Image: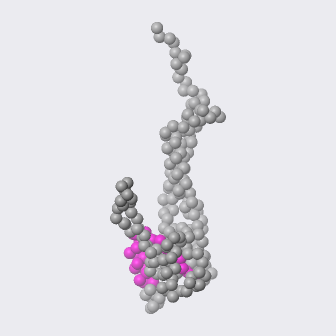
């Protein structure tokens, strides 16, 4: 393989296809791997000898009980002049009970109303025994809770009556974040197709450089008087 021919084989189309295909795969493959892991349901997490949450896990099913949210999230757009647009709410962090303690659940803003209703019904269940009637399905991945969210999580547990020692015994706080694994698979497929097209075009360009275009070269053309 001649390095010079290889370098000349890279044109804008090849670079764009390989770049966007590679970036799409880079961003989607971690979640793609999680999508093929065994699914743990929220119901199983309530069972005494049921499944346990682990970072990198795959969770899906109806959320049975949810307590109040301990933090909310907002997003904004930063402009080129340094100013930023008004904050837009993008969901809450709710506390969810399990057989081993608690974990956080990061909602989308579109699901806040439903989860707030389920939260009210959960507190009613704790006082009266009436099971919640609101159904909420969610699929997502498990991550470690980080930053200030850990502080807010711990403060909420303290409000519920837990001591610092008891909170520490619960282990590292985890959060279940919504992920559309269908979208992840689609994006992975698109990234793979773009990458393959880029490599095929690179191969075609390289072979053309190796064999030539088949057109006569300038020195082979007859002289014009």
Residue 101, x across and y down, in percent: 56, 81
Q: Residue furthest front?
A: 82
Q: Which residue is found at the position 54% from the left and 67% from the top?
A: 141
Residue that appears at 53% across and 56% down: 27
Task: State whether residue 86 appears in this view.
Answer: yes
Residue stretch rendered in magenta on the structure: 98-122
Quarter of the image that includes the N terminus: top right
Residue 107 drawn in magenta: yes
Position of residue 80 measured from the top left corner of the image (x, y, whole percent): 37, 54
Residue 8 in the image: x percent, y percent?
55, 34
Instruction: Say left or right for 171 vs 86.
Output: right
Left or right: where 134 falls relative to 205: left
**x, y percentage for residue 169?**
61, 82
Residue 163: which quarter of the image? bottom right
Residue at coordinates 63% horizontally, 33% vertically from top-left?
Answer: 2
Outermost residue on the bottom side: it is: 128
């Amino acid at each position: 393989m001649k390095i010079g021919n290889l370098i000349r084989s890279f044109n804008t189309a090849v670079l764009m296809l390989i770049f966007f295909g590679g970036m799409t795969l880079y961003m989607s493959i971690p979640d793609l791997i999680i999508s093929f892991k065994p699914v743990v349901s929220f119901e199983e997490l309530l069972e005494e000898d049921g499944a346990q949450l682990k970072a990198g896990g795959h969770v899906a099913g109806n959320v049975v009980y949810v307590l109040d949210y301990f933090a909310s999230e907002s997003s904004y757009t930063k402009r080129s002049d340094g100013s930023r647009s008004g904050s837009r709410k993008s969901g809450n962090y709710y506390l969810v009970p399990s057989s081993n303690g608690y974990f956080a659940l990061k909602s989308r803003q579109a699901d806040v109303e439903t989860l707030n209703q389920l939260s009210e019904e959960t507190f009613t269940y704790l006082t009266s025994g009436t099971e919640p009637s609101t159904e909420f399905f969610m699929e997502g991945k498990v991550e470690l809770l980080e930053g200030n969210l850990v502080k807010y999580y711990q403060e909420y547990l303290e409000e519920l009556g837990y001591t610092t020692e008891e909170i520490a015994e619960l282990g590292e706080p985890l959060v279940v974040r919504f992920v559309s694994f269908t979208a992840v698979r689609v994006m992975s497929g698109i990234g793979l197709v773009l990458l393959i097209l880029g490599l095929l075009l690179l191969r075609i360009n390289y072979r053309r450089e190796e064999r030539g275009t088949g057109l006569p070269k300038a020195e082979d053309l007859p002289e014009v008087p």
